[in-house]
Image (spheres, rainbow, N blue to C red):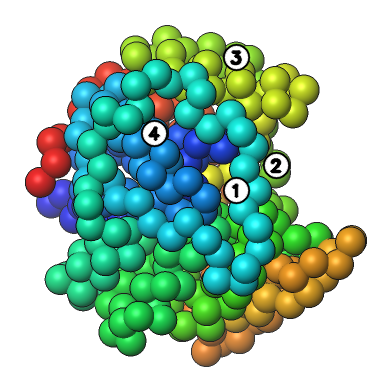
């Protein structure tokens, strides 16, 4: 008997750190396990991000439902924009993006199938928070929320939570069943030249990702990067590769050095609905990321419904 497919909405700030594109590719490569209902974008120029997501999908032979989401943060914090987003991809204006806003799409898909849709969010949490604020039924209708967010026990803030701390408070306070991959765990991974060259050999998608990875390296004057966001995807797809905490709650408070709003604090609580990824098989996760990208480059997930 085959396992049921995951019905997924993927929310992303794709285009800045290349790890969002890698996470999307891993989802596209899991065509036997995932039905990607929609991809939604958040934070800054979300139309550009949506077009870029569609471009990556097209390079894998896939046409997606892509929706541009919230540009501004609930907290009022200014969006950090690196400046290289989409610059290696000509003709993005021609990429198809749905007119329906991202939050509307989130609500439509989740409420149409209560208890069946997984939401994976790997950017600032503004879209998810807006869905919770707009529709009281949303939080109870999500099957599971998978996040790359926060840094736990480090005394430091993390980009996705720091970028919109008010949104993070809404999401963590809503009681959704949630699994969180935090910075303290994802930073154990490193993508280096050997893995990048394996990705480069994965058709048109792999070639594009190779260029984008190298661009990200150049941006930071490094020869490696951390694939943070695919960990949230693999926590869903390959749970045997990660170890989870006992349940608890997450609060978001000012902290770090310098002090900024967005420090994530986990408190164990048997009544809590959040579990953290506290350990992972570094080699197996690294291999699964490359394998997922190569699978995406080898064949389509399917046409848009």
For the residue pair 218 and 79, the one nearer the viewer reads as: 79
Of tags 1 and 3, the one toward the viewer is 3
Query: Looking at the image, is mark 4 or mark 1 earlier in the sequence?
Result: 4
Gap in angstroms between the C-alphas marked 2 and 1: 9 Å
Secondary structure at numbered mark 1: strand
Q: Residues within 10 Å of mark 2 (few under 14, many from 20)?
A: some
Tell me what residue is drawn at x 55 percent, y 71 percent.
Answer: 74
Q: Which residue is mark 4?
A: 52
Image location (x, y in percent) of residue 205? 37, 20
Q: Distance of mark 3 from mark 4, alpha carbons?
A: 25 Å
Structural distance between the alpha carbons of marks 4 and 1: 30 Å
Query: Are the residues tagged 2 and 1 within 8 Å (C-beta)?
Result: yes
Can residue 182 be seen by looking at this rendering?
A: no
Mark before the other along the chain sequence, 3 or 4: 4
Inter-mark Cα distance, 2 to 3: 17 Å
Classify residue 135 as left or right of residue 99: right
Residue 194 shows which numbered tag? 3
* Earlier sequence position, callout 2 versus callout 4: 4
Residue 273 locus on image (x, y percent)? 49, 79
Looking at this view, is 60 or 177 the one in front?
A: 60
- Between circles 4 and 1, the one closer to the viewer is 4
The answer to which of marks 1 and 3 sits earlier in the sequence is: 3
Seen at 26% across and 42% down, the residue is 97
Q: Earlier in the sequence, mark 2 or mark 1?
A: 2
Q: Which mark, residue 188?
A: 2
């Amino acid at each position: 008997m085959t396992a049921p497919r995951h019905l997924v909405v993927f929310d992303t700030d794709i285009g800045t750190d290349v790890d969002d594109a890698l996470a999307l590719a891993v989802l596209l490569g899991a065509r036997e396990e995932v039905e990607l209902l929609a991809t939604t974008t958040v934070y800054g120029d979300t139309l550009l991000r949506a077009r870029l997501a569609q471009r990556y999908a097209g390079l894998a032979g896939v046409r997606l439902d892509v929706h541009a989401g919230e540009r501004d943060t609930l907290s009022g914090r200014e969006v950090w924009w690196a400046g290289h987003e989409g610059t290696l991809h000509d003709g993005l204006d021609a990429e198809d993006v749905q007119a329906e806003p991202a939050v509307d799409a989130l609500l439509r898909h989740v409420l149409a199938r209560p208890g069946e849709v997984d939401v994976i969010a790997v950017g600032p949490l503004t879209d998810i928070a807006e869905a919770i604020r707009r529709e009281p039924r949303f939080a109870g209708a999500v099957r599971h929320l998978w996040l790359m967010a926060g840094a736990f026990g480090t005394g430091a803030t993390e980009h996705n939570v720091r970028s919109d701390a008010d949104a993070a408070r809404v999401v963590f306070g809503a009681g959704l069943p949630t699994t969180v991959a935090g910075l303290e765990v994802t930073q154990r991974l490193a993508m280096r030249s050997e893995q990048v060259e394996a990705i480069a050999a994965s058709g048109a998608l792999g070639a594009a990702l190779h260029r984008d990875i190298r661009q990200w390296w150049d941006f930071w004057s490094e020869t490696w990067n951390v694939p943070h966001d695919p960990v949230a995807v693999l926590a869903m797809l390959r749970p045997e590769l990660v170890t989870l905490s006992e349940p608890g709650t997450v609060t978001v408070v000012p902290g770090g050095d310098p002090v900024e709003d967005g420090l994530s604090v986990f408190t164990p609580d048997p009544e809590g609905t959040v579990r953290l990824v506290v350990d992972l098989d570094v080699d197996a996760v690294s291999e699964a990321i490359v394998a997922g990208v190569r699978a995406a480059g080898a064949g389509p997930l399917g046409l848009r419904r």
